[in-house]
Image (cartoon, helix red, strand yellow):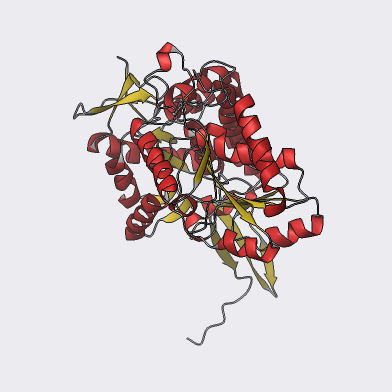
Amino acid sequence: MQRYKNFVNGTYLDNHTKEYFAVVNPATGKQIYEVEIADKTVLNAARESAAAGFKVWSAMDAVTRSRILMAAVSLLRKKNHELAQIEVMDTGKPFQEAVAVDVVTGADVIEFFAWAAPGISGSQQDLGQDFYYTRREPLGICAGIGAWNYPLQIACWKAGPALACGNSMIFKPSEETPLGALKLAEIFTQAGVPDGVFNVVQGAAAVGQWLTACPGIEKISFTGEVGTGKKVMTSAASTLKDVTMELGGKSALIIFEDADLDNAVSAAMLGNFYTQGEVCTNCTRVFVHTSIQEQFLKTLLDRIRANIKMGDPMDPDTNFGALISSEHREKVLSYIQTAKAEGATQLCGHTMPDLPNQNQEGFFLPPTVFTHCTDEMTLVKEEVFGPVMAVLDFDREAEVIQRANATHFGLAAGVFTTDIQRAHRVIHQLEAGICWINAYGNSPAQMPVGGYKQSGIGRENGRETIRHYTQVKSIYMGMGPLDSPF
């Protein structure tokens, strides 16, 4: 059984405790490799390495940093197939998704920030005889804590802007999907990123807690669920770290009576069944106008039966994979049981399709749709993070806006209508940070991503993110004798 180590100062580093954890392939239920846990020796080495790397990296001019990051982008694209296979093995998601989205969009983000880096600038303002100017300077050491649903993509989303702005990073991937970040570290080193600029430390909550409380780390960027995010923020407050958080959601998709029905069904399926429903922006509350709900449900069920292909995620024809773990599958099943007990009607997902022999012990769960849902049901209020869609009906625009906003989440929302004025009128009233009109799920590198309310703080991607990885220094320039009463 292969055992991977932590990546510190441009190489793999042994821990002293010899502790490790096992990683399981969700599609087979079998252990596939082991990873050493970052002990205090490794963590302290990572901090020292990141501090030394920051001095070298931040002293480089932005054009040089940009060229090195572009070399990493080239390597990511060249290794797309290999890296996608790792993502499938770790996450259980279909290969057809990983090869088209996970690595590609991660590379896109690093490319975007590599091009943006040389344009990072301050401002200058005349004050009569004197003047002042500002500089945007890097923060120092940044820590990234990733999630398990898009492990490599999230690592790129955090490393791209951090490194482009001149910072160094210590990144902790989820212990359930740890390998992609190590491969990214190898790629950065191969591309010419100086040793210590990007380090990977492995482990569970204890390692994350060390990062959030560690003096000398200036920023935490965390992706995960709300409860953990609150703990991260509390810990980071002890040293007044800057914090970016992309947390959970219970997003609404609103489908009006004049919507293009086929496109609306496509959005509902993408927003509930892509990556087996393990996507934080998923539109798990689908509000459908009463007048078209029957037609919507018929089209939806027909397409689920005809188009969902559950099976071996490595099979290119598979478009629906396995959930991340046995424990998570049990959690999702408990939501399904609660929904039925609270009076919702399950329309599909009662039985499992036949699976290949190697996948019989995998953590699969079929796509599930509930109707006759109400806003008070547990399924409608809480984040399930699985392939479970709640369909709700509505009659009036003002009503559905109020209901869509009646949640402590505020990550994403979507509206389908051919009335362009209504589309913008409604989307402007929805309390969510990422919104789509007649689309769902698209997240290009140029577009800021983040949530309102308890769904997050700060933004990832887009030029907005540069503000979150730099700090402003103001310099006042006196051009004459200093006026002083002394």
Residue at (29%, 46%) from the top-left corner? Answer: 210
Return the x and y of residue 386 as percentages of the image width and height: 47, 38
Q: Is residue 278 left or right of residue 480?
A: left
Q: Of 461 and 397, which appears nearest the observer?
A: 397
Residue positioned most to the left: 17
Which quarter shows the N terminus? top left
Return the x and y of residue 132 as percentages of the image width and height: 62, 67
Res 166 visible: no
Return the x and y of residue 265 as percentages of the image width and height: 67, 39
Residue 141 drawn above or below residue 22? below
Q: Of 447 and 423, which appears nearest the observer?
A: 423
Q: In which quarter of the image is residue 363?
A: top left
Return the x and y of residue 89 as percentages of the image width and height: 44, 21
Residue at (53%, 53%) from the top-left corner? Answer: 468
Residue 403 drawn above or below residue 120? below
Res 476 visible: yes
Q: Quadrant of residue 124?
A: bottom right
Residue positioned most to the top: 357
Q: Of 130 and 195, which appears nearest the observer?
A: 195
Residue at (33%, 25%) from the top-left corner? Answer: 23
Q: Is residue 186 left or right of residue 5?
A: right
